[in-house]
Image (cartoon, rainbow, N blue to C red):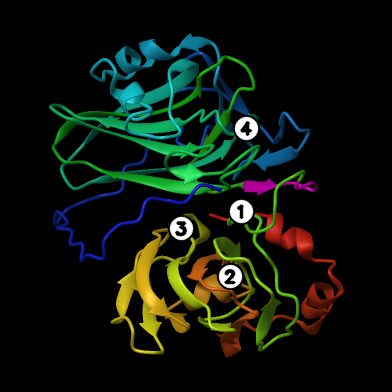
Amino acid sequence: MRAFPLIALSTLAATLTANAAAISLVNHGFETGDLTGWVSTGNVQALGPTSVVTFNNIVWDITPNGDVMGALNSDGAIATELDAFFGLPFGTLQNLNLPGVNPAGGALTNGSGIYQDFMGNAGDTVTMFFDYVARDYVSFNDPAFGVLVGPTGFQAQILASIWGGGIEVDTAGNSGWRAITFTLAETGMHRLGFAVTNDKDTILDAALFLDVAPGGSSTDDPGDLVPGESPLFPVLPDSGGFGGPFEFFDPTPGLWYDPPFAEAYTYTLFGGAEFIEFSTPDAGFGFGDLLFTDLTGANASFVAMAGVKYAIAPTSSFKISGIPNFAIDFQDPNFAIAFPAFLDWTGTATKLQIDITPHPDAIPEPSTYALLGAGLAVLAYRRFRA
């Protein structure tokens, strides 16, 4: 999986409008069973549970939050016409996927789009959940986009792709259900839109699903995906039971590692290797921003934003803490079943050890750990919650 761009550590501040509200759209979750309230172009439908088959016969099963979800397939419309469809300047979407700007990018060929117009005030927010599935492989990128067009300006971004922008799912991958929230910069009529496209060819279409809340996303077959190359298919521990420590012997740097069920994690390398880069799961996993603490003193403590890869001074041990109780509470509907962390290091490690601080209110039934210990709950790690 291609690395996310590194960013410098910084403090971000946001000013909220006093009377800001969360916008509710017409037929926000497509529960009318059709596209009432929405305008579409290309291959767009309202569907129930849907299976997406990739080029290498991985089957991703996507289910809505309720009975129905919006479903876009990246065919049916000419990609260059999507800008006009959304009311964007010509070339806006293509510019996000230009080879000179996005190393994974290329010419957008065809795609599909959907939008809804609504009134809103500056500071209001509008949220949609999406799930992106790639049928194609690297070096195709097939990006999906989210746009918000206001009275005088617009916002546009890549939501997900194969390996260049947004949630990067890699070959035949799946983003799982993720949230995208736009904040209105001005008052007036706005247009919220979504698109999914092909680039470089017009075959092996990508799929984009939309809903008002997260649904389900799973596969029984990881195909040729390599454990650790995606946060949705992380490396699992070689040893460790409830309470840890969880051990990974002769680990490989630059992969995602995942022990379950804790409110804090301490990562330690043995054999002389030192961490130089890390990332917590992106916000779609339900954890939010967390506290980074270097246990060797090589780095100052800071708040690590969800899903951002940070370059750090070499260190052999650090801690991530501040995970909210609901995210590790088996009884909570927002329970997050995994905490994949991206870890990269310099040198050769003989062992990666992850010590955990379990929360007493989040202890599962003994039968659950029996399943995990027997290896019968592996599919739980392939069910993705946003």
Q: Earlier in the sequence, mark 4 or mark 2?
A: 4
Distance of label 4 from label 3 (alpha carbons) = 22 Å
Disc nearer the start of the sequence (1/3) = 1
Q: Mark 1 and 2 residues: CB-CB less than 8 Å, in contact?
A: no
The residue that label 3 is drawn on is 282
Q: Is residue 321 left or right of residue 340?
A: left
Residue at mark 2: 332
Who's the residue at 39% across and 36% down the image? 158
Residue 290 appears in which quarter of the rendering?
bottom left
Question: Start and end of the magenta stretch?
Answer: 216-222
Residue 26 in sight in this render: no
The residue beneath circle 4 is 137
Q: Are marks 4 and 2 in contact (CB under 8 Å)?
A: no
Above/below status of 27 relative to 333: above
- N-terminal-most mark, 4 or 1: 4
User: Of the residues shown, which amino acid type is indicated by label 4?
Assistant: Tyr
- Marks 4 & 3, CB-CB < 8 Å contact: no
